[in-house]
Amino acid sequence: MKFGIVVSEGPYTHQASDSAYSFVKAALAKGHEVSRVFFYHDGVNVGTRLSVPPQDDRQIQAQWTALGKEHGLDLVICIAAAQRRGLLDQNEADRQGKDANNIAEGFRISGLGQLIEMGIQADRTITFGD
Amino acid sequence: MSEVVKKFLYVNRKAPYGTIYAQEALEVVLIGAAFDQDVSLAFLDDGVFQLTKGQDTRAAGLKNFSPTFRALGDYEVTKLYVEQESLDERGLTLDDLQDIQYEDEDDDYEEKPSIIVVSRAEMANVMADQDVVLSF
């Protein structure tokens, strides 16, 4: 089965991104396909490379980056939600006149159309939220 | 834009202000309208407050996005399911909601109401009938 995943809450404050991560990992292990993971609302904050969680805690962004690399996952951060919350890639930083970017490796910023497209293409769309 | 037409339901469960869910849900609906899918919206729990008329957010310094709901018909978003029990539990009636209409191009562009009040049991059927349910 082809899954599309929505993560709609931020890391650490909510369990949503942890649950999504566990689900994606389990689905892939069972031979399913994950066509895209779309980060929306505060979920976009999963994709900052500037978070520094305590060493004895799980490293949410690093986990996603590693899983994405291993399985070639399409980790998409919503541009509108990201702009509000200060999550930028270099292209956006240049375009908006900001002095830095903070997007983590393996993530990309794109539009809400990617969410709808995911819904159309996936067999099941699952939202991990509050 | 796409040959596949799926039934999309956007479920709105939160009050319009206080959190950003309602506003960002509406942004998805507007973008999604370009994909020519079969779109419905559901309003339940505090989400029914999103459709109330006379919203004034000036004192709170927030953007009042409620007029956008009246424009949804222009985007061919014409099915707004509102749960009766959620209205009842909050002391609201249909009269408290905005008059949201669309022009039915299959019926000589007659103006018809977009809001469909359904019972909780009927709402379950609406949800079961969808291909993609996005919850906000």
Image (cartoon, coloured by chain):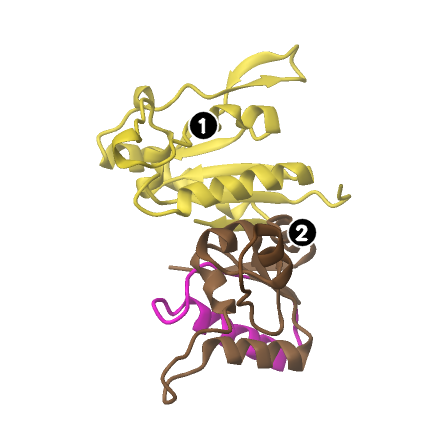
Chain colours: A brown, B yellow
The image quarter in which residue A15 lies: bottom left
Does the residue at mark 1 contact the one at mark 2 (Cβ under 8 Å)? Answer: no
Q: Position of residue A121 (x, y in %)?
A: 69, 55
In the displayed structure, A12 sits above or below B45; it is below
Identity, as a three-letter code, of the amino acid under mark 1: Ile
Pointer 1 indicates a residue of which chain? B
Q: Where is residue B65 in the image (x, y as percent from the top left)?
A: 42, 32
- Element at badge 2? helix
Q: A60 left or right of B54?
A: right
The image quarter in which residue B67 lies: top left
Numbered range of the magenta stretch: A6-34
Which disc number belongs to residue A39?
none
In percent of the image, x 23 and y 37: which residue is there?
Answer: B89
Identity, as a three-letter code, of the amino acid under mark 2: Glu
Which disc number belongs to residue B116?
1
Q: Where is residue B77 in the image (x, y as percent from the top left)?
A: 57, 31
Camera-side residue of B71 and B3: B71
Camera-side residue of B102 and B61: B61
**Does any portion of residue B119 appear in the rendered image?**
yes
In the displayed structure, A118 sits above or below A51; it is above
Query: Is residue A9 one of those drawn in magenta?
Result: yes
